[in-house]
Image (cartoon, rainbow, N blue to C red):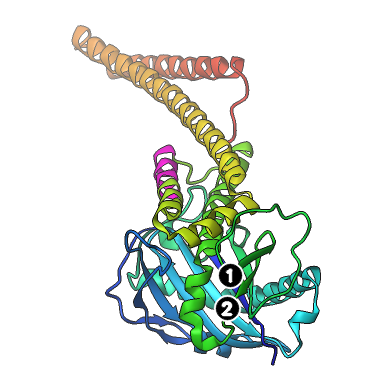
Amino acid sequence: MSDVLHVQTRAYPLHYASVDRTVGTVVVPGHGEIHPVPGMLGSVAYNAEETVDVDFTDLARAAVSLPDVTIVGCRIRILAAGAILVTYALRHPTDLRKLDVHALVALDATINRKLREADRALLRDVLAAAQRSGLLRQVMVPPGGAAAADWTEVDPRAVRYNCHFIARDPAWEPDGRVPGLVLGPHCQILLPYTYAWDGDPSPDTIDDILTMLEPADIAVAQQSVLVGASVGGLRILTELARAAPGRLEGPEFRRFLDGVWADYHHLDAYRVESGQAHRATYLAARETIGLDGTHERAEKLLSHVNASLLAEASLRSERLDRRLNRVAAALTVVASASFLLDIAAFLLPQVSGQMKVTIVSGVTLLAAGLLSATISWSGDRNAERGPALPR
């Protein structure tokens, strides 16, 4: 076995109101049970940051099998903010030290793609079971798609991941395009989202390893939150552009945005809550992956989505007002016809039945004509304003 531990940490953005740390068992249909336990971010120095941890090794090994790759551990960490970290610890029979950084990245990308294909259904079932059990409370999803009650999985386009290589005295050379930044001890950025760590690669030290990796993984969790919000916003813009009917409500989108920004800034507090060494690595990681640029682009996109939703709400209100005006006009015509019949019955009490029939028929035809003219006039006015979008 290589003396290098290959670790992949995926960040799944999933916005929830809170995490119930008292849930001790979650039943995953078809896979058995998982047992969440309270945990803590070990790199936070000032205010304790709680997590919920799940040892996922047995379920992952049962569901995932990759050639020439050994899964030595798998851990799920549910953060207090809206992100879930799934970490795989892997071993390879080949000596990874003999590969340059680009060969390392190519190997990592291949394995990550195969892993995501192999465990996608399993993780979908686990997250859905966590919601049903009450472990994740009040999951919020972007409007325009399925309701929260019908949610099944995180959009795969929103998932982001880090690649870590843990070894004693790692000797890989960083890519020349990586900027020279001040880093905490034991860390080296080889490429964006790719890190080398000087530490004990034994899987027995997985708790210490996860604490060591937290600065970079918190940064990628923030990236996933922003990308997930942008993916949801793009879906809404597509539906608005196609004038497709859907769950496009401004207040619902505002609540979703409140959740997104609350989670993003909750994670951003890591820059002041973490210890000095971890903080340096976190700041370097977020600069290398361009997190501030992602933040700016997401903010512009989501502001545009919000403006488009407000315009759509105004348009729908205008259409509703026109329909209500036509209904009111029609009711006025019907009421006038009824009033004419009452007058006729009062003024002509002694007329013959044939005459009454003639009067009633005449008034009815007059009302029908007025009603048709009212509807046609409203339709002509709408046509003058331009074609309406399909409803």
Q: Secondary structure at mark 2?
A: loop
Segment tinted magenta in the rendering: 250-260
Q: Is residue 56 above or below residue 344?
A: below
The three-letter amino acid code for the residue at tag 2 is Gly
- Quadrant where the N terminus is found in the figure: bottom right
Q: Residue at x 53, y 74 (%)?
A: 123
The three-letter amino acid code for the residue at tag 1 is His
Q: Are marks 2 and 1 in contact (CB under 8 Å)?
A: yes
Query: Which numbered disc flags the more N-terminal residue, 2 or 1?
Result: 1
Quadrant of res 366: top left
Other-residue count near label 1 (Cα within 10 Å), few / some / many at <14 / 14–19 / ≥20: some
Residue that label 2 marks: 199
Q: Is residue 255 magenta?
A: yes
On the image, the x and y values in percent for residue 305 come to: 54, 37
Other-residue count near label 2 (Cα within 10 Å), few / some / many at <14 / 14–19 / ≥20: many
Front position in the image: 267 or 27: 267
Front position in the image: 189 or 368: 189
Q: Is residue 352 above or below residue 3?
A: above
Residue 356 in view, yes or no: yes
Residue that label 1 marks: 186
- Quadrant where the C terminus is found in the figure: top right
Give the overall secondary structure of the magenta segment. helix
Q: Residue furthest bottom?
A: 1
Tell me the CA gap for discs 2 and 1.
7 Å
